[in-house]
Amino acid sequence: MYDQTKSAYLYIRVSTDEQKRKGYSLPEQEDRLLKYCAFNNIEVKGIYREDFSAKNFNRPEWKKLITVIKNKSKEGKSILFIKWDRFSRNIELAYEMIGILRKHRTTAMAIDQPIDFSVPESTVMLAVYLSVPEAENSRRALNTANGIHRAKLMGRYPNKAPIGYINLTLVDGRKIIAPKQPDAEIISWAFHQLVKNIHKIEKIRNMAYDKGLKCSRSHFFRIIHNPVYCGLISVKFNSEEQQMVKGTHDPLISETLFYEVQHIINTKRKVTAKTDILKSTFFLRGFLTCPLCGRKLSGSFSQGSTKKYSYYHCQGSCKTRISAPFLNDCYQRKLQQLVLSNGAIGLLKIILEDCNTNSQKAKYLHDQNMVIIKLNEENSILSKARKLFVVDTLKYDDYSELKKESLANSKCLKSELQDINIKLKSIEEQSQLASKPFVDIFKGFSSLDTANKKHLVNLIPPVKVNFQTGDISLELNGALSKILTSKKHKKKQ
């Protein structure tokens, strides 16, 4: 079949599943190809071996071979392999690659399935040889998908175990996923933190990372959306229809907790960090008008030589602008001049009593005490470990790991304690409101979150703003004018 002077490159390919299924091996293929070349007096220019799928030609060794072929386009040569499924398992890409090889005076040939390209009818056999591997791949993929679908309907998780679990094979051969510590405990802790709706998701991820959960930001988001952790497995029937099946594995959290977390992260957290900064900096945007053209003022940052500066500005040709921090402070000072009227103070006292602040305070004190106990336990554990390390009872690696875990736990507990203390302080301030000579209800305006600030600005919008001096007049509607008054007016009363 080959000219005595013809040269060839040997291409040997195998994939892991083929070795298991058909017993293919690289040495066996190489041995057969070398014997074939020796028998037919074919000069072997090079041997290229790889363990890679033949779904496409994006294979490391094949790319190297093609580079060599293109650099020696003037020489007549061949690429030899055992069967056409070693060359490709995609008929469309295979024909395309055969055309490329022809341009460089190279012939692809399978020694077990020879094709005489000079005979037109031989293209029929080539189509058969190439289509069979592709059909095998398609059938195998379909069987695999059906098997995974059946396994999920039975409540089994057939894929690689998600973080927090590990794949196990039982004595009877059944494959399951089981909780893997300490990741499982940390993921459970993260869900319990999320449901409190106190911290941002990124802060909880960082706290979980400090505790030992090593995953990226995107991976953490996949974790908190994955129903596997509450014992459910999602089964898709088509692009629109899916259902949840009760899994046979042990859940890390309850279904109730999982869906509460989904409600929080899907409805209250869809805000980017950049949008948060813009809203918090320009909370008066939408309520200010340009004194020259009457347009609504926008807000943006201007890059200075050392830092960024924020301005409310007009987008018209008048180019009016004013420092955002200056105007925000002017509005805040004007707002803090408003206090409750005498009649409203009595009503507030009744409301505070109805809120049952004593029971809330008792709950927070209990939580505070529990966190302090846990902190003391962590300190005690670390102290004991340090003593064992000093007397050489505890190895350095074990001590280092224990210390790292203990410090991470203490950091999280201190953060929880800080949140509880803030709540207790808020309750204490509420209980003291009615006893003040006049109530500074807007004293804590600067510490409010952006949503509450915008709500207050909407209730008490600024009017008649002097952009030179910063003097602002506030508009009180009928209801608010009856319960709020200025400090100056209150002193006169």
Image: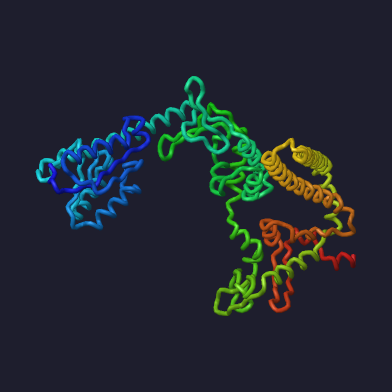
Q: Is residue 316 left or right of residue 16?
A: right
Residue 88 drawn at (x, y percent) = 27, 42
The residue located at (56%, 41%) in the rendering is 223
The residue located at (61%, 41%) in the rendering is 261
Q: Is residue 137 left or right of residue 300?
A: left
In this rendering, the count of numbered labels is 0
Residue 27 drawn at (x, y percent) = 31, 36
Q: Nearer the viewer, residue 98 or 235?
A: 98
Q: Residue furthest top?
A: 172
Say if 4 sits above or below 317 in the image. above
Question: Which quarter of the rendering shows the C terminus?
Answer: bottom right
* Display coloring: rainbow
**Does the rendering let one see residue 285?**
yes
**Does the rendering let one see residue 356?**
no
Say if 103 sits above or below 156 in the image. below
Residue 243 drawn at (x, y percent) = 48, 33
Residue 446 occupies which quadrant of the picture?
bottom right
Residue 280 drawn at (x, y percent) = 66, 61
Say if 430 sits above or below 396 in the image. below
The residue located at (64%, 73%) in the rendering is 306
Residue 241 occupies which quadrant of the picture?
top left
Question: Which quarter of the rendering shows the N terminus?
Answer: top left
Q: Is residue 281 left or right of residue 65?
A: right
Residue 338 occupies which quadrant of the picture?
bottom right
